[in-house]
Image (spheres, coloured by chain):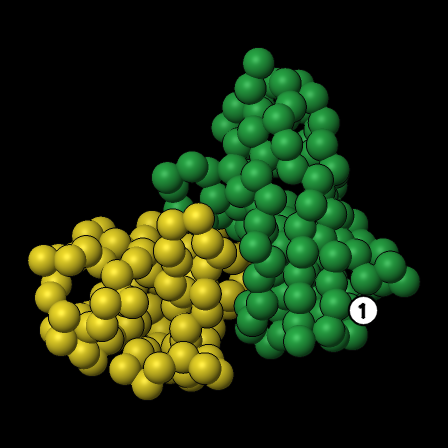
Amino acid sequence: DIRMTQSPSTLSASIGDRVTIACRASQSISSWLAWYQQKPGKAPKLLIYRASSLESGVPSRFSGSGSGTEFTLTISSLQPDDFATYYCQQYNSVSWTFGQGTKVEIK
Amino acid sequence: EVQLVESGGGLVQPGGSLRLSCAASGFTFSSFEMNWVRQAPGKGLEWVSYISTSSVTTLYEDSVKGRFTISRDNAKNSLYLQMNSLRAEDTAVYYCARVGGYPDNWGQGTLVTVSS
């Protein structure tokens, strides 16, 4: 199985901060990576697919980069609605795997 | 509008069975591969099972192999997960998810609680 490792596990930030979350795959997954935002009691919301493609309707302050084994999700200017948990997911193999999540908290 | 609506969750005793359903609408269900993903309370996301468009290929996470069965009825636009020999560690919200080149749509989830 492909292991996905996110860092950090928790991130404290202020409104307007630039936030970066890293995700590493245990083997190359090309660009078959998605990023999700999840709020308590809600389903995950797709933000980014194919490592850097912005899902329709997602604000442009979200961006993704990387390929192979190293990936990054960036929020250019953190907004109040962005405090949530973020997950990366590989779909290079049919048996998906997810990172453990990064909780973005208010500083 | 694409919609995926899960149902069938509830409280079940250890060793019991439950059948989850996922009703699809707003797209040609038979053209899309489907998955089940679960999330235990306070934990991260875990892939559970996959089914191809024609049901020829099914895959399972190791801990559910031999206990869970994924299936679909393309005529009814529905996805299913038959869960047998349930354990406390199967307690989770179960989501169905569509693969449209990438995992592009998820349902809202249904809660399964395994407890005596």
Please, is residue A107 above or below residue A66 in the view?
above
User: From this viewpoint, is residue B44 visible?
Assistant: yes
The residue shown at (23%, 67%) is A80
Residue B54 locus on image (x, y percent) = 82, 63
The residue shown at (87%, 59%) is B76
Please, is residue B44 above or below residue A57 in the view?
above
Residue B103 locus on image (x, y percent) = 55, 68
The quarter holding residue A54 reads: bottom left
User: From this viewpoint, is residue A88 visible?
Assistant: no
Judge from the rendering whether residue B76 lies leftward or rightward of residue A96; answer left or right: right
Residue A49 locus on image (x, y percent) = 45, 76
Q: Colour of chain A?
A: yellow
Indicate the secondary structure of the residue bearing disc 1. helix
Please, is residue A47 above or below residue B44 in the view?
below
Q: Nearer the viewer, residue B85 or A26?
A: B85
Name the residue at the top extreme: B116
Q: Colour of chain B?
A: green
The residue shown at (57%, 55%) is B108
The residue shown at (56%, 71%) is B104
Amino acid type at image mark 1: Ser
Circle 1 chain: B
Judge from the rendering whether residue B49 lies leftward or rightward of residue A24; answer left or right: right
Packing grade of label 1 (10 A; few <14, some 14-19, many >=20) is some
Q: Nearer the viewer, residue A62 or B15?
A: A62
Q: Which residue is mark 1?
A: B30
